[in-house]
Amino acid sequence: MGRVLGVGPGSMNGLRWLARVGPCPLDPWRYAMGWSEVAARSHARRLQNEGWLARYPMIWGEGYLFVATVAGTREAGVRARPVRRTTASLWEQHTAVAWTAARVKLRGHGLLGAREILERPEWSEEIHWQEHHHSGSWGAYQGHHVTNHWTNLRPDLILILRDGCQLPIEVELTRKPDGRLRAALFRHAVWCARGQSGGVIYVCANSHECERVIKHAGDVGLLEDRDAIRIELLETIRQQTANAFERRRDEPLRSGIKPRARSEQEV
């Protein structure tokens, strides 16, 4: 019988990442941690055996979302809200946030993960917007209705630069009403004006949404040419993350240094 490996420092680092960032597919998790696919699956098995990690299957061919359980979050010792359940409607958002967080990690910046932000009240503020509706048809009475909406705005992630500057990251995959988008951008303008943040980064699913964010950002005073807002495409982030991982993995070979062999327990 083969030797049964336990949870070592590498596995615990991976668990802390999941507890901070939230549900994460295999590739962004292993890229962020610097693992091969084989090593990542080994760490996942060890953590799952302890009851500290759960796997949620996505649609066929899409693999799993890896999640730190309530017990795993407690064991990780991080200030983060545990994931108690996840639904199919959130898979795409979780995946996009995980890829974005992995790129931040590979670039060497600090990070507040999505589950950590839920425990930081200073990054949660109410926003308000209105929607205007017209009812009736031509030749009949046409009514004008105003619907008020309120919700709490929380960034998806917060990038922390080496000088301590904090940049909220918003991952926008679905088209939100114009009023809500403007209200969110205005709140980011306020955070920037009072020195709480150094601006905001929007990650969008397509170029049309990028242009839409830029348009409304100008309406509230977040001007791209002043570095108050940066817009990026999700697909670009995915590609940059994979490329950064490959470059880091190949660095010892290009320098002529033979990597030291590590046991699976050390990974």
Image (spheres, grey):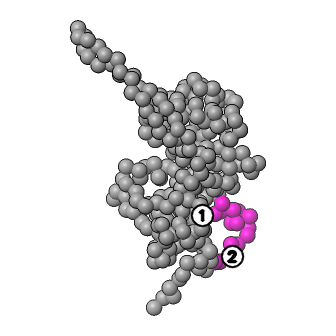
Camera sees residue 186: yes
**Magenta stretch contains residue 251:** yes
Residue name at image x 44 percent, y 27 percent: 130
**Magenta stretch contains residue 178:** no
Image-quadrant location for residue 15: bottom right
Residue name at image x 48 percent, y 66 percent: 70
Residue located beneath label 1 in the image: 78
Quadrant in which the N terminus appears: bottom left
Q: Which mark is residue 25?
A: none
Bounds of the magenta span?
A: 248-262
- Disc with the residue nearer the chain's start (2 vs 1): 1
Residue located beneath label 2 in the image: 260
Camera sees residue 41: no
> Residue 166's spot in the image, x, y percent?
68, 45
Tell me if residue 71 comes above or below residue 84 in the rendering. Answer: below
Local crowd at mark 1 within 10 Å, few (<14), some, or many (≥20)?
A: some
Residue name at image x 52 percent, y 31 percent: 183
Specify the amino acid type for callout 2.
Arg
